[in-house]
Image (cartoon, rainbow, N blue to C red):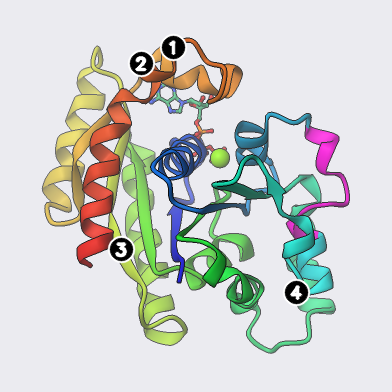
Amino acid sequence: MAKVITIGLQKGGVGKTTTAGILSFMLAKDGYKVLAVDMDSQGNLSSLLTQQEDDHFSEKTILEAFVSGEAAPYIYEVNEHLHVLPADDFLATLARFLYTEYQESNKSLALHELLAPLKDKYDYIIIDTPPSLSEPMVNAICASDYVVVLAESSKWAFNAIPRFLDTVAFSRENINPGLKVAGILRTMNDVRRADSKAFVEVIGEEYPELCFDVVIRRKASTGRISLEGLYENKELSKALDQYQDFYKELMDRVKNG
Ligand SMILES: Nc1ncnc2c1ncn2[C@@H]1O[C@H](COP(=O)(O)OP(=O)(O)OP(=O)(O)O)[C@@H](O)[C@H]1O
Ligand SMILES: [Mg+2]
């Protein structure tokens, strides 16, 4: 049965998609069967992992999966190990669909229901989320076994963490009792800036149990995977090296948790 992991924070631009993409890629490289689910209408995870143009998935996205009640026809196979359930801008209409046409009473479990028939086909399902606590984010949290909280080392990301953890706790208490926080991953650490270093420390002191030891640095080669992709990228090992330790720590927590 697949372990479902959401990468989230309602703050934008903290490295959610980069982390979700790299994690999916590394798991697949390791031989696991992975489904990467794009719950963000920006569609960045879809484009990072499939390297297709934005309009490639027009009317063949997770939104159509929700409407038809079946995800399998909309899964794009990158290779044998890595599959993607893509999104495009129209996913922004998900809430309207849920509150007007979706028949089930619990609107927060729509993704859970959609993924249920797929769980025996994958080892891991990795969900990327949008920068808001809206329906796609809540659905991702309610569909997950684990949440990885992404915290850029900045004040606004730091300020977003309590409300995000409250949302996770609410989901655990009311909807998804098995849900765990795998940890807080500090990202975008700009080693030249004192304020960035300070927030790495502040977040570490505030959440000592939850923080992963590894801190992801702001690094040009990691940022450039949005341009160069993950497949024919000459600087790939340089871009991914700082994620190796995160991968090990996460696997430890998920396997032992
Ligand atoms: N470690 C890093 N070093 C340098 N640049 C990075 C790093 N991680 C991500 N980036 C770049 O920073 C930008 C934001 O990253 P990303 O899109 O992964 O964040 P996000 O949290 O998914 O954003 P959104 O909330 O808009 O979905 C992107 O241009 C990405 O390429
Ligand atoms: Mg993103």
> How far across and down, in percent of the image, does residue 9 sit?
44, 50
Q: Which residues are magenta?
A: 54-63
Q: Residues within 10 Å of mark 4 (few under 14, many from 20)?
A: some
Going 81% across and 51% down the picture, which residue do you hit? 90
Q: Secondary structure at mark 4?
A: helix
Q: Nearer the viewer, residue 32 or 64?
A: 32
In the figure, 35 relative to 26: above or below?
below
Q: Amino acid at mark 3?
A: Val
Q: Amino acid at mark 1?
A: Glu
In front: label 3 or label 1: 1
The answer, for residue 86, to whether it is visible in the render is no
Q: Could you say which disc has been placed on residue 235 in the image?
A: 1
Query: Badge 4 is on which residue?
Result: 98
Query: Badge 2 is on which residue?
Result: 238
In front: label 3 or label 4: 3
Q: Do tag 3 and tag 4 residues touch (Cβ < 8 Å)? A: no
The residues bearing labels 2 and 4 have C-alpha atoms spaced at a distance of 42 Å
Query: Badge 3 is on which residue?
Result: 181
